[in-house]
Image (spheres, rainbow, N blue to C red):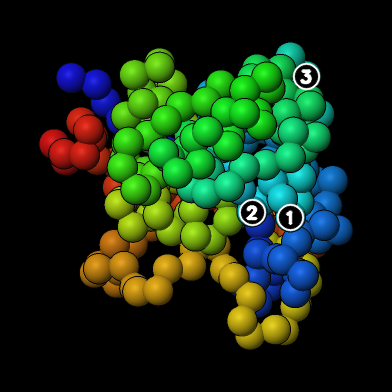
Amino acid sequence: MTQLPNVTINMAMTLDGKVSRPDGRWYGLSSRNDKKRMDEIRSKAEVLILGKNSILNDDPVIHLRYVEDGKDPRPVILLRSGTLPEDKKVFRFSKQPPLIFCLNENYSLVRDNLCSVAEIVLIPGTDLNPLEILKVLSEMGYQEILLEGGPSLNDSFFRLDLISRIYVTIVPFLVGKNDLPSITGGKKEYPNFDQKKWKLVASEVIEDEVFLIYEKQNVERIFGREL
């Protein structure tokens, strides 16, 4: 039997817990120190999972810039609908072809638009279930997964209890707007959330930013079953 990969989330948030500007983007809120730390975290991963909105809104740089001799994680994109422009940085600068998971309803569109710049995997059914995604990645030999999606994508993994570590950078800004997203954004609370404490395993202050690492109790998982 195959063990599910380890999944880590890396996010930055403002002092009032926001993960985007009012326009839905993040530009200008992270320092050089945070970008260095992000590359250090990425260099430990084999796969970097991104969401469609993150690519459209921020067009993030995927390759490592601050870690010498580090190996870039392979980008993985979850596309539940539509497609993406092929001029995005993830397609132009990735050292390995990005891996795109999509559904029947958009498979033809994604294939026709992106087959020359990415490997495309069709997932049966009506949704990209995170557990099914992790099973496929595990079967491909990937065991260290880094998630850098938005609140909805993060929520889909948290809700299935698939996250083992959280990296959080607190940046020194207050946005103030009350309807902006946080690290995770579901419509319902997590069952027994007040009985599932995360352990703070590291904290560091560099200039005006705080870098935190939280881990949950280690639970071995074999394709969805706790042992």
- The reply to whether the C-beta atoms of the residues labelled 1 and 3 are less than 8 Å apart is no
From the top left corner, tell me how far across and down residue 121 is, in percent: 46, 27
Q: Residues within 10 Å of mark 1 (few under 14, many from 20)?
A: few
Q: Which residue is mark 2?
A: 53
Quarter occupied by residue 41: top right
Q: Which residue is mark 1?
A: 57
Q: Nearer the viewer, mark 2 or mark 3?
A: 2
**Image quadrant where one finds the N terminus:** top left
Please name the amino acid that badge 1 sits on.
Asn
Report the Cα–Cα distance between label 1 and label 3.
28 Å
Along the line of sight, the residue nearer the viewer: 117 or 96:
117
Q: Which residue is mark 3?
A: 68
Report the Cα–Cα distance between label 2 and label 3.
29 Å
- The reply to whether the C-beta atoms of the residues labelled 2 and 3 are less than 8 Å apart is no
Quarter occupied by residue 7: top left
Q: In the rendered view, does 92 fall on the left or right side of 138?
A: right
N-terminal-most mark, 2 or 3: 2
Quarter occupied by residue 173: bottom right
N-terminal-most mark, 1 or 3: 1
- Residue at screen point 74% across, 40% down: 85
Please name the amino acid that badge 2 sits on.
Asn
